[in-house]
Image (cartoon, rainbow, N blue to C red):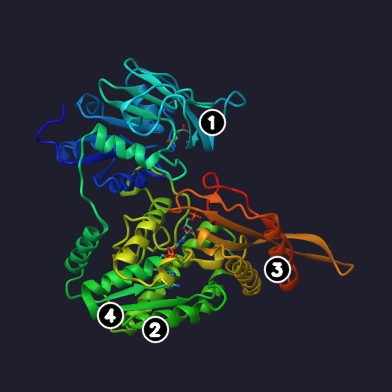
């Protein structure tokens, strides 16, 4: 039973999944406070927090691999409910006496992406949500699977690739899902997690975005004191929300700096300048750094090296501007959680680096200024909600994200002035067509990519030998998982025709049909 001294909170044990923070946010959405602890520190965190329940995350590791992470055994004896997700389910099964096997070539290679489960029995996790016999869409990402469950458990849902899609031990209130309920491509996943934290664990909870705003304003004041702050402003949603939040906290101790690195989209600099200057009373400095970025990228083809160079160069520019303004103690950025998790391991935890986002993993170690990153735990749509809470104009809040390294990571291979100019034109045509078709708001992010591949074509009876352009459009809620946008063929062929006719240097257009995972949204 729940002890009286338990706090209204949930402990999330991180085994290094890319989506552990999504678990935290689903718990937040259920109005409940949670903390994430790497598995190595979970025992201490449990003792400190006295949570009402525990969630075990996924992991890039495999239970059958030697030296792979384990949950502190005491968690299974603590008397609180446990939900194991993917690796969490596998490790719990293994530690409690079940069996987990790695994928075997040919026999079964795992399930990645959309899958369907069938509910075979009732359990507390499904209450008011799923009934026996129903089929539900879920998101899977596993190569290993449980092949024998531990004593006390029974199977309550199955899928084609994972006969143990959901297992339950109602007596101990232990549950395991092979799929990821925390990602949006499991449509009922949020409700399932809410069921676990509210119904199974008994948490009530009262977390809101207005409370978050107040807490952050107070924290920014405490951190900055009377210091000076410069904020990297891109005109994107994240840095605009960060700037306004910081301005609310410290007023004219803040100056914003917009860097034109020559990797921006068509007319972007002018748009950002006008939109921001017309709307806000915050000083804005625009830096023309086109030459140094293009020159510095010359000859580089490795995606991580390109990203690291851009991250470093951004900081150099910020430091120079800070000096010009008479010094600054803090650099503010609109860094979000997805930037953090793909770049580094959470709190020194066990996740792997997928790519170095320029504002996190790309940062040089020698930086003079301290970082102010009030959005570091949030996801994109939470930032949009906070933006609305702060009264931000819809034209900022609804913009598609644009990555800091800009066109450089949409030109696989070497970035040159000429290739940037070609891509800018193709991208502008694609987005113009999307807007004209009224599809902009239905798509999470859309852009063109210029491939380092030339193909043969025929135009006006002449042979052409030019570059391939790939079009990408995805739907997503938070950028952590994404699905392709299903344009109709007529739309795509219209865009292809326009690009090939209007952009010199491109003679072939293809559409990218890859979801995330297994792909990422950007190509580098
Ligand atoms: N051109 C730029 N000039 C100054 N700072 C930038 C620039 N591009 C990116 N940054 C900084 O890097 C951070 C991360 O970039 P990111 O693209 O993730 O966020 P954003 O541009 O604010 O929002 P969005 O994701 O909607 O594009 C920004 O919040 C901003 O602080
Ligand atoms: O500011 C940024 N700096 C970066 O280095 C960076 N890399 C990717 N992105 C954006 O993050 C989201 C997820 O992208 P990926 O699936 O490619 O990792 C998508 O919205 C990407 O556009 C970046 N944003
Ligand atoms: N997403 C996960 O937790 C994956 C767990 C494990 N690495 C597997 O492939 O099955
Ligand atoms: Mg951006």
Identify which residue, 306 or 231, lies in the foreground. 231
- What number is the disc on residue 327? 4
Q: Nearer the viewer, mark 3 or mark 2?
A: 2
Which residue of the protein is positioned furthest toward the top in this rendering? 151
Q: Which of marks 2 and 1 is nearer the N terminus?
A: 1
Q: Position of residue 516 (x, y in %)?
A: 52, 47
> Which of the two discs, 3 and 1, sits closer to the camera?
3
In this rendering, position of residue 214 left or right of residue 510: left
Check residue 499 in the rendering and tell me which mark sits there, or answer none.
3
Whichever of labels 4 and 3 marks the residue nearer the N terminus, that label is: 4
Q: Which of these two is toward me, 388 or 361?
A: 388
Cα distance between the residues tagged 2 and 4: 27 Å
Q: Distance between the residues labelled 1 and 4?
A: 54 Å
Residue 339 sits above or below residue 328 on the image: above
- Cα–Cα span, label 3 and label 1: 39 Å
Q: How many marks?
A: 4
Q: Can you tell me whether the CB of the residue at mark 1 lies under 8 Å from the nearest atom of ligand 3?
A: yes
């Amino acid at each position: 039973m729940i002890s009286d001294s338990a706090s209204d909170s949930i402990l999330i044990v991180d085994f290094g999944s890319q989506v552990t923070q999504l678990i935290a946010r689903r718990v937040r959405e259920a109005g409940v406070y949670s903390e994430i602890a790497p598995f190595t520190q979970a025992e201490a965190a449990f003792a400190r927090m006295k949570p009402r329940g525990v969630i075990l995350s996924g992991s890039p590791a495999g239970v059958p691999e030697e030296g792979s992470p384990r949950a502190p055994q005491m968690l299974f004896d603590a008397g609180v409910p446990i939900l194991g997700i993917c690796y969490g389910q596998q490790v719990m099964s293994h530690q409690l006496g079940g069996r987990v096997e790695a994928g075997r070539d040919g026999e079964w290679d795992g399930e990645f992406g959309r899958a369907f489960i069938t509910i075979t029995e009732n359990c507390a996790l499904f209450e008011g949500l799923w009934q026996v016999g129903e089929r539900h869409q879920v998101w899977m990402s596993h190569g290993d699977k449980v092949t024998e469950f531990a004593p006390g458990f029974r199977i309550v849902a199955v899928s084609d690739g994972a006969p143990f899609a959901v297992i339950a031990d109602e007596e101990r209130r232990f549950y395991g899902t092979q799929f990821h309920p925390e990602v949006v491509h499991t449509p009922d996943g949020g409700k399932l997690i809410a069921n676990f934290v509210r119904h199974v664990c008994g948490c009530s909870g009262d977390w809101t975005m207005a409370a978050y705003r107040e807490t952050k304003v107070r924290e920014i004041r405490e951190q900055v004191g009377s210091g000076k702050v410069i904020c990297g402003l891109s005109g994107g949603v994240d840095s605009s929300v960060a700037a306004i939040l910081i301005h609310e906290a410290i007023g004219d101790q803040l100056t914003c700096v917009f860097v034109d690195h020559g990797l921006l989209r068509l007319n972007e600099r002018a748009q950002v300048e006008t939109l921001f200057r017309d709307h806000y009373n915050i000083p804005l400095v625009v830096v023309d750094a086109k030459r140094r970025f293009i020159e510095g990228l010359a000859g580089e083809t490795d995606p991580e090296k390109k990203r690291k160079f851009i991250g470093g160069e951004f900081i150099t520019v910020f430091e120079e501007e800070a000096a010009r303004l008479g010094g600054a103690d803090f650099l503010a950025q609109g860094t979000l959680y997805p930037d953090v998790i793909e770049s580094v391991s959470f709190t020194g935890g066990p996740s792997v680096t997928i790519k170095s986002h320029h504002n996190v993993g790309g940062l040089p170690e020698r930086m003079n200024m301290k970082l102010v990153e009030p959005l570091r735990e949030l996801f994109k749509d939470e930032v949009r909600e906070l933006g609305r809470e702060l009264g931000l104009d819809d034209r900022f809040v609804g913009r598609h994200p644009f990555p800091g390294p800009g066109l450089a990571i949409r030109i696989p291979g070497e970035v040159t002035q000429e290739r940037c100019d070609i891509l800018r034109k193709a991208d502008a045509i694609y987005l113009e067509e999307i807007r004209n078709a009224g599809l902009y708001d239905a798509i999470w992010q859309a852009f063109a990519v210029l491939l380092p591949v030339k193909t043969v074509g025929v135009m006006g009876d002449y042979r052409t030998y030019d570059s391939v352009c790939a079009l990408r459009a995805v739907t997503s809620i938070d950028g952590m998982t994404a699905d392709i946008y299903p344009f109709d063929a007529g739309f795509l062929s219209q865009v292809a025709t326009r690009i090939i006719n209007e952009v010199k240097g491109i003679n072939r257009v293809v559409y990218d049909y890859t979801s995330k995972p297994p792909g990422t949204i950007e190509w580098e």
